[in-house]
Each structure stands twice: as structure tokens, then as C-alpha cells.
């Protein structure tokens, strides 16, 4: 079974299970519409993208499910806009035929930039049931072993807890460590760690690179929490920043045009993150 199909079957199963047993906010009809819309846009772009051969794309379903589970928007059309932009960047914002950002993560960042008051990142839709978390873990392991990305979530979880303790809890008496590790009980948070954080297309292939990648995301998200207070978007902002480097740093030689393009994209990435960070926090973020 192809890896992408395997992952999509796992995610679809978890989405259905979550809808039946947890608190997925979208109506099932809207979810189906978003899935179908994503498939349509993906294959329309494949048709017009002459640099790639036309094929059935399983990965677009992963994008749609990630957006459904991690984004709450007040209008259905917002999902259509962010999904379209995420897929467009996947096909056309490329560096030597490789895209720079995980499409689901890109969609969340776009939502925070253009629809901050109407779209919110949420990690609690699937609840915190231990059995559900174990199901996610088992399904994720079946993917991570095949994709050779198991080290990323392991390093991230331990480094994130370590950095949070010494850089946040140690300095902020109003924050207790239980608040930090309770985030790991959130099923959707686990989905972020096991599926979005480990996307093979925008994560290093070497073991050393994967360790650095996971440590960097844990450290940057924690530093943002340390100086600006806990906000769930910090994790996704850190992924957005570090994903940019994955397919650029390994290149030994960059042409002048490629270097200019990289600098422009980096400037836009940093500008987007600064803009998002200086938006007023949502009321449910103020207490960490």
C-alpha cells in the first residue's frame, strides 16, 4: 500500500472516530464538501502544472483533514480560500521542484494572517481521552516507521517538555508544569506531532537533521511562549519557520536568482510570523 494512501486511511478513520465520539465542530456535510473541494483543486492544479505528471493525489486528503481538525472558521468559504492557497503554494512556490511548507500548516498560517478574527487554531476538537490517544499512537507508529521519521516526535516531545520547564515554568510562578504536559493529552495535539510535524516532504531525511529540526521547533515555540505567553499558534509558527530551511540548506550551490528568491521568501516568512505574533491573543489563550 502506498505510504500516502496508508496515512490517509489512518486520518480518515481518526476523523470519523472523532466525529462520532468527540466534539468535531464542523457538520459532517461541510467536512465532506471540504474533502471533495480539496481533491478537486489539487487535481485541477496538477492538470495545469506542466512540471508534474498527472496522478491521483492522496496527499491532498491529508491537507483537508489537517485543516478540518486544526482550524475553526466562522464561514465555510474561509476553508476554501486557505485550502486553495495552501495547494497553490505546494505546486508553484517551489525550490528546485520541492515545496517548502506543509500545506496544512501553510493553510493555518494564511488563516491567521488574513482571517485572524474569523479563524482560530484549535487543538481540543478530539478531546483528551486516553484510549483515543493510544489509537492515534498506534496508527502513527505504523506510518512513522515506514517513513523513517520516528525520531522527530520522540525528540520533540522530550525537548518541548524540557524547554518548557526550564524556560517557562521556572521563570513564571503562575504556570505549573501540569499545564504544560496536559497539552500532550489532547488528541489533536498528538495528531499535529505525529502527522504534520513529520511530513517527509518538508522534514530532513537524515537522522541528525531530524533531531535538529525537532529541537529547533521545540526551542522556538517555547521561547515565544516565554516572552509572549502561551499561544497555541506558536507551535505552528515554529514549524512554518523551520520547514522553510529543510529543502534549501542541503543545496551546496545557489544561483544568484535562487538566492534572491530564498531571501524574498525568508523575508515574507519572518514578516508573516511577526504580524501574527503582534495580533491580540484570543481570550482562551490569556491564561495559558
Image: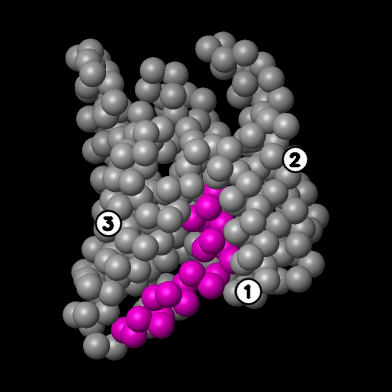
Q: CA distance from mark 1 to mark 2?
A: 31 Å
Residue on which disc 3 sits = 220
Give the magenta part as a residue range: 175-195
| Mark 1 neighbour class, 10 Å CA radius: few under 14, some 14 to 19, many 20 or more | few
Residue 143: image x %, image y %?
Answer: 60, 44
Q: Is residue 188 one of those drawn in magenta? A: yes
Q: CA distance from mark 3 to mark 2?
A: 35 Å
Residue ID at (75%, 40%):
36
Residue ID at (44%, 19%):
97
Is 8 rendered above or below residue 66?
above
Q: Nearer the viewer, mark 1 or mark 3?
A: 1
Residue ID at (29%, 88%):
174
Q: CA distance from mark 1 to mark 3?
A: 28 Å
Is 248 rendered above or below residue 223?
above
Q: Earlier in the sequence, mark 3 or mark 2?
A: 2
* Quadrant of the rendering where the C terminus is positioned: bottom left
Residue 12: image x %, image y %?
Answer: 73, 50
User: What's the colour scheme?
Assistant: one colour
Residue 281: image x %, image y %?
Answer: 37, 71
Q: Earlier in the sequence, mark 1 or mark 3?
A: 1
Q: Earlier in the sequence, mark 1 or mark 2?
A: 2
The local secondary structure at tag 2 comes to helix
Name the chief secondary structure element in magenta: helix
Residue 94: image x %, image y %?
Answer: 42, 24
The local secondary structure at tag 1 comes to helix
The local secondary structure at tag 3 comes to helix
Residue 130, disc: 1
Residue 107 at least partly seen: no
Residue 95, disc: none
Residue on which disc 2 sits = 36
Is residue 115 found left or right of 44 in the rendered image? Answer: left
Q: Is residue 260 one of those drawn in magenta? A: no
Amino acid at each position: 500500500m502506498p505510504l500516502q494512501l496508508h496515512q490517509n486511511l489512518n486520518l480518515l478513520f481518526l476523523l470519523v472516530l472523532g466525529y462520532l465520539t468527540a466534539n468535531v465542530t464542523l457538520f459532517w456535510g461541510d467536512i465532506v464538501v471540504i474533502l471533495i473541494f480539496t481533491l478537486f483543486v489539487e487535481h485541477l492544479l496538477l492538470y495545469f502544472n506542466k512540471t508534474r505528471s498527472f496522478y491521483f493525489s492522496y496527499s491532498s486528503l491529508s491537507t483537508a483533514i489537517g485543516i478540518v481538525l486544526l482550524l475553526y472558521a466562522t464561514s465555510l468559504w474561509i476553508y476554501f480560500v486557505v485550502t486553495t492557497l495552501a495547494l497553490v503554494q505546494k505546486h508553484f512556490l517551489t525550490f528546485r521542484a520541492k515545496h517548502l511548507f506543509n500545506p496544512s500548516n501553510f493553510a493555518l498560517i494564511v488563516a491567521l494572517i488574513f482571517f485572524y478574527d474569523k479563524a482560530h487554531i484549535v487543538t481540543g476538537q478530539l478531546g483528551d481521552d486516553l484510549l483515543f490517544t493510544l489509537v492515534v499512537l498506534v496508527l502513527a507508529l505504523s506510518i512513522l516507521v515506514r517513513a523513517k521519521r520516528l525520531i522527530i516526535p520522540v525528540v520533540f516531545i522530550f525537548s518541548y517538555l524540557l524547554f518548557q520547564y526550564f524556560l517557562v515554568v521556572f521563570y513564571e510562578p503562575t504556570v505549573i508544569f501540569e499545564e504544560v504536559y496536559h497539552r500532550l493529552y489532547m488528541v489533536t495535539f498528538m495528531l499535529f506531532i505525529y502527522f504534520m510535524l513529520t511530513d517527509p516532504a518538508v522534514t530532513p531525511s537524515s537522522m541528525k537533521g531530524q533531531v535538529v529540526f525537532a529541537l529547533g521547533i521545540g526551542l522556538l515555540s517555547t521561547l515565544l511562549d516565554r516572552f509572549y505567553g502561551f499561544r497555541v499558534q506558536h507551535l505552528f509558527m515554529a514549524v512554518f519557520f523551520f520547514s522553510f530551511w529543510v529543502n534549501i540548506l542541503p543545496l551546496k550551490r545557489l544561483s544568484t536568482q535562487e538566492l534572491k528568491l530564498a531571501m524574498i521568501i525568508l523575508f515574507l516568512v519572518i514578516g508573516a510570523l511577526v504580524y501574527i505574533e503582534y495580533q491580540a491573543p484570543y481570550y482562551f489563550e490569556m491564561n495559558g
